[in-house]
Amino acid sequence: MSEVNETNDGFIQMVINPSQTLSNWFVGLGLLGIFLAVLNLLGEIHPSYRVSWSGVLTFELTNKAFENLDTAPAFVMSDIVFVAICGVFTVLGLKTINEQDGGVGAWVKSIFVNQTWMSLADPDNGGWSKTIGAWCLLLSVINYLYFGILSTGWIDPGVYSVTIGLMAFGFALVYAANSPKAEESNS
């Protein structure tokens, strides 16, 4: 029984005090969720639908996930709950990031000024794997913003699938390029 409690305590500690990598994900996903919630409240998340976050997160067990923009209420309680959940993840992530050298300011700067973006134009800065990975990451962000702004396609499954595919491939290539090289043995 003590092993179960230690596992639960470990999970809770992992969420309350996330690692640097998990903090990046908490902040990124939390801010994306808050952004989407604000767009939903403004009626700009989709051309003809309004999202019910409780319906989305429970796979329509509690209510419909998408309702007609003209007939759906502009504000429901699940909007507050969704923003609160995203806010908690953002705060937990920022708490850990703020404890690092340079704090949140250095973290924001590191998003825009780093070796990954430098490799966009210079394959000698990490190899072709890093260059292609950086381009995949950049194209994933451009794809999401382009279709979100021009088509109000912020929650479109097609836009998500292309964005996530490019992003995952980009992360994989960049991490592969940054991984330590194996030592060759002369056996």
Image (tube, helix red, strand yellow):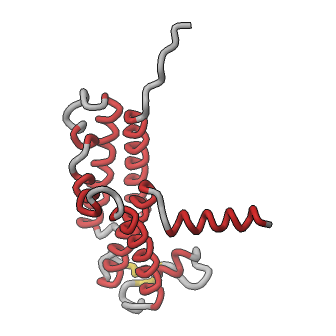
Which residue is at 42% across, 89% downward? 72
Left or right? Give the position of 122 relative to 137: left
> Which quarter of the rendered picture does the C terminus lie within?
top right
Q: Is residue 187 above or below residue 135?
A: above
Asked if residue 125 shows in the view, the reply is yes
Residue extending furthest toward the top: 187
Percent across and percent down for residue 181 are 43, 26
Residue in front for this viewpoint, 6 or 113: 6
Percent across and percent down for residue 123 are 25, 29
Residue 100 placement: quadrant? bottom left
Residue 144 placement: quadrant? bottom left
Which residue is at 34% across, 84% downward? 41
Left or right? Give the position of 181 relative to 130: right
Residue in front for this viewpoint, 172 or 114: 114
Residue extending furthest toward the right: 1
Residue 128 placement: quadrant? top left
Residue in front for this viewpoint, 34 or 152: 34
Asked if residue 29 shows in the view, the reply is no
Percent across and percent down for residue 7 are 68, 62
Which residue is at 47% across, 86% downward? 78
Q: Is residue 105 above or below residue 64?
A: above
Percent across and percent down for residue 113 are 21, 48
> Which quarter of the rendered picture does the N terminus lie within?
bottom right
